[in-house]
Each structure stands twice: as C-alpha cells, then as structure tokens.
Amino acid sequence: MAIKAVLFDLDGVLIDSEPIWERIRRAFAEQRGGSWTPAIQSRMMGARTVEWSAALSELAGGTVAPESAAEAVIAELSDAYLRDPPVIAGAGEAVRALARDFTLGLVSGSPPVLIELVLRILEVTDCFAVTMSADDVARGKPEPDPYLELARRLGQEPSVCAAVEDSANGIRSAHAAGTHVVAIPRGEHRPDQHVLALADAVLDNIRELTPGRVKKLG
C-alpha cells in the first residue's frame, strides 16, 4: 500500500535539541538539590510537558510547581534556539522535498510555542498540513496515542503513514500506532538494536530521507 503521509518528530529529527533540553533541565534540577542520571534523561526524551515538568518538580523536592518548572525551561529553550538555532544539516531541504510528494504532519513532546518557533527558523511552516504537541493526547510516547491522533487529524490510516523518529520512545510509539517507521538515531542516547529492529528503515542522517526512499516503504 502506497505511503500517503510522512509524520515527523521534531527534537532529534529536525533539530539537535536533545543536548540543550538535557543541559537546561539538568541544571534546573541540580540547582535545586536534585540529581540527574542517564535513566532520567532517557525517560524524558519525547515526554509530554506535563510529564517532564512533574518529574523536574519531584527532583527539586517539590520546591517548584510543575507549571513553574515548565515555564522556566521553555523560556530558556526559546532563548537558546534563537541565539544559536540547533538545526540539523539537511533537515529543511528534506522536509521541502517530501512535501512535494506527501502530506506532512508533525507531533512532538515539545509544547506548541517551541514547535512553531523551530518551523519558522527552518522556514518549513507551510510544508505541514498538521502540527501538534503530544500534550494534546492523554498518553505520550512511547504509547501510540500521539501518532494515532496525528494520523486521525490528517485523515489517514496509520498503515499508509511513515513516521520519522530518533528516540526509543518515539520509535516504540510509531510502531505501536501501526505506522511504517524510519529511524534516524543520533547522539548519546541512541536506541539499542532491539528497538531499532522495530523500524522499517534505519538511516544514517536525514539527507537519506528522500521521496524515493519513503516510497519504497509502501
């Protein structure tokens, strides 16, 4: 069955933001007496705002409300993106090429304000028919809810969609939703081989995400 839509993640796929997220959230927790571990970082990748802000509040011993933690972290992230946009080389070109042949959607654990900012920086806002935050669904990645809802909003069955992900949580989410999965692992927190085996294709970088490559998934 031919692929009709390509569903993008944001962080780690279009922008190299995970190190920035980790630096800012880690500093927030440690400055308030909390400790940070690789397990905490892995759990937060792709998590909804309500989830990671609650975790930060807990790490800070409850001294800061989750809502205040989210507001502070998101403000720092916005400043960081504007100062030095962490754009992944080739991301904008890949999106624009795919938009000529497929309907595009995006779902991210990032809040809407950051999604909109990044798409403006990349100059690809008009390429996406639907963008949404995982904050809009009851359960975030690795549950299938984000991709199921994005496919629904696009008016497509998951089976004719291809999701582009970098993280273990994201790959599990897209696979559980029934989409084809393209994995582009990167950074220190690469998914293990067991998770990558869930993907239909594993690419070295986003420049390999061409319309021809996506069509072969169908």
Image (cartoon, rainbow, N blue to C red):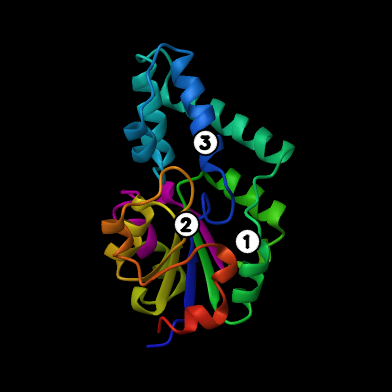
In percent of width and height, residue 32 lies at 45, 12
Tag 3–tag 2 contact (CB < 8 Å): no
Is 18 covered by the magenta stretch?
no
Q: Give the secondary structure at mark 2.
A: strand
The image quarter containing residue 185 is bottom left
Image point 36% across, 15% down: which residue? Answer: 62
Q: Give the secondary structure at mark 1.
A: helix
Residue type at the position of mark 2: Val
Local packing at callout 2 (Cα closer than 10 Å; few below 14, some 14-19, many 20+) is: many
Which of marks 2 and 3 precedes in the sequence? 3
Q: For mark 1, what is the residue?
A: 91
Tag 3–tag 1 contact (CB < 8 Å): no
Left or right of 114: which side holds 181?
A: left
Q: CA distance from mark 3 to mark 2?
A: 17 Å
In percent of width and height, residue 67 lies at 46, 27
Local packing at callout 1 (Cα closer than 10 Å; few below 14, some 14-19, many 20+) is: some
| Mark sitting on residue 21 | 3
Q: Give the secondary structure at mark 3.
A: helix
Which of marks 2 and 1 precedes in the sequence? 1
Q: Observer-nearest residue: 66 or 18?
A: 18
Local packing at callout 3 (Cα closer than 10 Å; few below 14, some 14-19, many 20+) is: many
- How many marks can you see? 3
> Which label sits in the foreground, 3 or 2?
3
Image point 65% across, 55% down: which residue? Answer: 119
Residue stretch rendered in magenta on the structure: 129-148
Q: For mark 2, what is the residue?
A: 107
Q: CA distance from mark 1 to mark 2?
A: 16 Å
Could you tell me which quadrant the C terminus lies in? bottom left
In percent of width and height, residue 186 lies at 48, 52
Which of marks 1 and 3 precedes in the sequence? 3
